[in-house]
Image (spheres, rainbow, N blue to C red):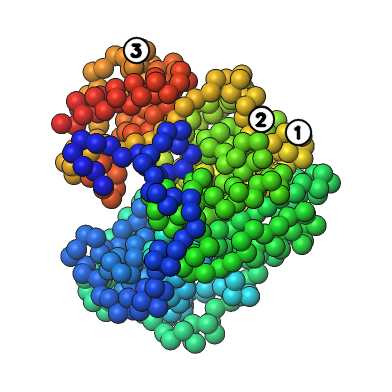
Amino acid sequence: MITGNKEKVSPAAGQNCAMAANPRAGKPALPEDLIDVPHLVTAYYTVTPDPDDVAQQVVFGTSGHRGSSLDGAFNEAHILATTQAIVEYRAGQGTTGPLFIGRDTHGLSEPAWVSALEVLAANDVVAMIDSADRYTPTPAVSHAILTYNRGRTSDLADGIVVTPSHNPPRDGGFKYNPPNGGPADTDATGAIAKRANEILRGGLREVKRVPLARALQSAQRHDYMDAYVSDLPNVVDIHAIRAETIRIGADPLGGASVDYWGAIAERHSLELTVVNPLVDATWRFMTLDTDGKIRMDCSSPNAMASLIAKIGNYQIATGNDADSDRHGIVTPDGGLMNPNHYLAVAIDYLYTHRPDWPASVAVGKTAVSSSIIDRVVAGLGRKLIEVPVGFKWFVDGLIGGTIGFGGEESAGASFLRRDGSVWTTDKDGIIMALLASEILAITGKTPSQRYEELADEYGAPVYARVDAPANREQKARLAKLSAEQVSATELAGEPITAKLTTAPGNGAPLGGLKVTTADGWFAARPSGTEDVYKIYAESFKGPQHLAEVQEAAREVVNTVIS
């Protein structure tokens, strides 16, 4: 909560600054922390959302529609309306192939998956469901879409993943992946959300639906896990990991990758242990995140505390969030790596160990990712493409093979196959986790050891994110800012080198402001859910200079939005 003019530091992962943690952060969940799953599911079916209440409408963020049934924000009506809207949207786009649909382990995911199947079948859309009724990671759905569409120009497939990602157990989530396999862009999600809300206001009269038994009869089965796991040697050097007998601990954090990690170990004969191989919609085996909530954030030291405590058993330990599109990397020498640091290491390694990638292949990063990536990419002599927040901006480059790696500071990334062709166009926490073992197998160094070498060469940045108060009008002004409105010429004692309101990599609006100097930068973006704006900041001159950058950022932003 924001009180007065105090800022809260985000519980988001990988930050180099401290926040006031909940006293029980990093400690095991207790009975009073757990949700009542039957109550949650009952609310999904019995609570009717108010379509005139903004908080109860269908809203697609960067990762789909999310919310809790207990708040009237993720209920059967939402999913029926949204699925019908997707059916109409894909028809309007000429998408006539099957729809690959997967779900994660959240308590609301199966009910929403069932609702979606009933609508898809009634609209004569062939749903591709898992052949063994397994949970399905986001990257496995993206992989399936791309594999099906390879070489096709018509009757293309698309997909839905039912997941709120790393959100707490009370939440549900629902996201659409078009035929390019990646997250839907804002044109698509905006159209789908608008139509879904129209359907809601119309009392669902336009929803076509059949009973589940009939829906399952018309669905087709697809072995997502076999297709994905058997293909892994084409994107990661599995042979090297096996040859060096790297001891791996993989923690699915109770998510959709739980069966996949066991299959990867068995199929590829790896020295891999599935840590916490449990699925429980309450997530009672989790340690609490920084704010005292259960959250499957694989880049949070508190959420990952149980795995970090076991690192002595493994050479590389990894975690994934509930839909496995994010990764957390733990090493004996470095503990849980800052996501920005691992992105830099992954880029440095891939662009020097993928001989079949063309020399022209660029690196993709978001505007709020660390500038050590910029320095590493420059050192490699590669092109850097800096885009706004959101993995969707990397999709076209990954499909076309013009971007070899796309990554976000929130611990989400994907990269090309070893031959330079597309693997997935959504974030893939499984291959990012396996890559850490490949790096150790090939170089003899852990990713954290390699990061220290890069920091010695390029400088060691200090990075943090904080929130500052802003009302709805101020947030709107920040989102539509032009660079000319910023009159400042220096930031924390250094001349300003750039004032950006559009991304240098593709010219797309940042939805905020980024200001850079030789040794620091900040980016400010309005929050979509709270009366705050987010300040991302970084300094290569240490914590004191970072604090000065943050203070200067507040002054610059408040001057132009007040």
Disc nearer the start of the sequence (2/3): 2
The total number of labels drawn is 3
Q: Where is residue 32? Give x, y as percent.
A: 39, 66
Give the residue displayed 34% in from the left and 65% down from the top: 68
Quadrant of the frame with the C terminus? top left
Residue farthest front in this picture? 23
Q: Position of residue 125 (x, y in %)?
A: 48, 74
Q: Quadrant of residue 494?
A: top left
Could you tell whether 482 is left or right of 387 in the image?
left
> Does the residue at mark 2 contact the one at mark 3 (Cβ under 8 Å)?
no
Query: Where 144 falls versus 441 (above or below)?
Result: below
Q: Is residue 408 above or below residue 94?
A: above
* Residue at the image point whose x is 30% and y is 62% from the top: 58
User: At which x and y percent is residue 531?
Assistant: 23, 45
Of all residues shown, which one is farthest toward the right? 243
Q: Residue at x 65, y 54 (%)?
A: 250
Name the residue that disc number 1 marks: 443
Disc 3, SS? loop
Q: Residue at x 47, y 27 (%)?
A: 462
Q: Which residue is mark 2?
A: 450
Q: Quadrant of residue 203?
A: bottom left
Q: Nearer the viewer, residue 225 or 203?
A: 225
Q: CA distance from mark 1 to mark 2?
A: 9 Å
Which dot marks residue 493?
A: 3
Are circles 1 and 2 on residues that touch, CB within 8 Å? Answer: yes
* Mark 3–mark 1 CB contact (< 8 Å): no
Q: Is residue 309 visible?
A: yes
Question: x%, y% of residue 526?
Answer: 28, 40
